[in-house]
Image (cartoon, helix red, strand yellow):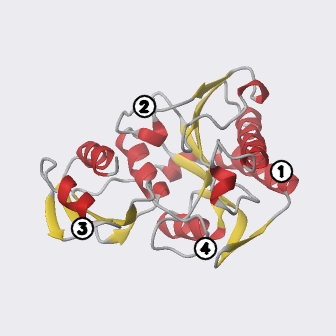
Amino acid sequence: MKIYISADIEGITGVTHWNETDLDKGESLAAREQMTAEVIAACEGALEAGAREIWIKDAHDSGRNIFPERLPRLARLIRGWSWHPFTMLQELDASFDALALVGYHTGAAFAGNPLAHTMSGNIAWIKINGSFATEFLISAYTAALVKVPLVFVSGDSSLCAHVTAFNPNITTVAVKDGVGDSTINIHPELAVERIRTSVAQALSKTSACLIPLPERFSVEVQYRHQHRAYHNSFLHGAVLIDPVTVGFEHEDYFEVLRFLLFALG
């Protein structure tokens, strides 16, 4: 069994302030330690379920947060960014048996995490087919594009509720709640235990987690500043909906990802 793990940091237990997510800030060390521990837990759960190959994408900010030497020796770690349209799922393809998302967070326009955002701080929100999008949703459709089941998500409870509403077969582990500009977190060791156990269980029901792709995609990106909307409205196929919102439509989700790669840059 070949497993892909994509890891972010804003949905890791304890992470509350932007300084804790910034590699250049000393406060980030504890968050990076816990991010690494939660990824290791996901690896251990996958190994328990029979995985023989594990690929990990460090999918936060610089892509250089996880401590590589602590990972299982068979794991392959993708650091940095290639700028392929798959972004947080770089190198994912049909050869993988399952996808797990660790440390993910709720999106822009959602409550439940003081660090909520979707892909970029320059974005007020993204909608896909009329619904506010999270990085989970963007990744879920990417996995569907290459027919890889998305079996597990850990992060804040707001995101986990969103995931369950989207597909109740996906196993979730909530490690924190966000209240205003604060977080209520479970113990780091408990988060690790729950992730390890839940990933192992999730890999026993992969077929129920294969997500169907919509036949067509209508995307709206609202920016915080009008000049970004004006600039990106000149992307091929894009339309300026209002001074801060750009729209894009296509039946091919890869073209949506290509649009987002440049529209969010």
Q: Which residue is mark 4?
A: 112
The residue at 45%/73% (across/down) is: 109
Q: Earlier in the sequence, mark 4 or mark 1?
A: 4
Task: Specify whether 156 is left or right of 142.
Answer: right
Q: Quadrant of the N terminus?
A: top right
Q: Height in image: 119 above or below 70?
A: below
> Which residue of the protein is positioned furthest toward the top in this rendering?
73
Bin the neighbour count of mark 1 within 10 Å (Cα to Cα): few under 14, some 14-19, many 20 and up: some
Q: Disc 1 and disc 2: Cα gap in Å?
A: 29 Å
Q: Disc 2 and disc 3: Cα gap in Å?
A: 32 Å
Front-lying residue, 89 or 225 = 225
Q: Which residue is mark 3?
A: 245
Q: Earlier in the sequence, mark 2 or mark 3?
A: 2
Q: Earlier in the sequence, mark 4 or mark 2?
A: 2
Q: Earlier in the sequence, mark 1 or mark 2?
A: 2
Q: Amino acid at mark 3?
A: Thr
Q: Disc 1 and disc 3: Cα gap in Å?
A: 42 Å
The residue at 19%/51% (across/down) is: 251
Q: Amino acid at mark 2?
A: Asp
Tell us which disc is closer to us: 4 or 1.
4
Mark identifier at residue 93? 2
Q: State if disc 3 and disc 1 touch (CB < 8 Å).
A: no
Q: Secondary structure at mark 2?
A: loop
Q: Quadrant of residue 77?
A: top right
Q: Which residue is mark 1?
A: 193
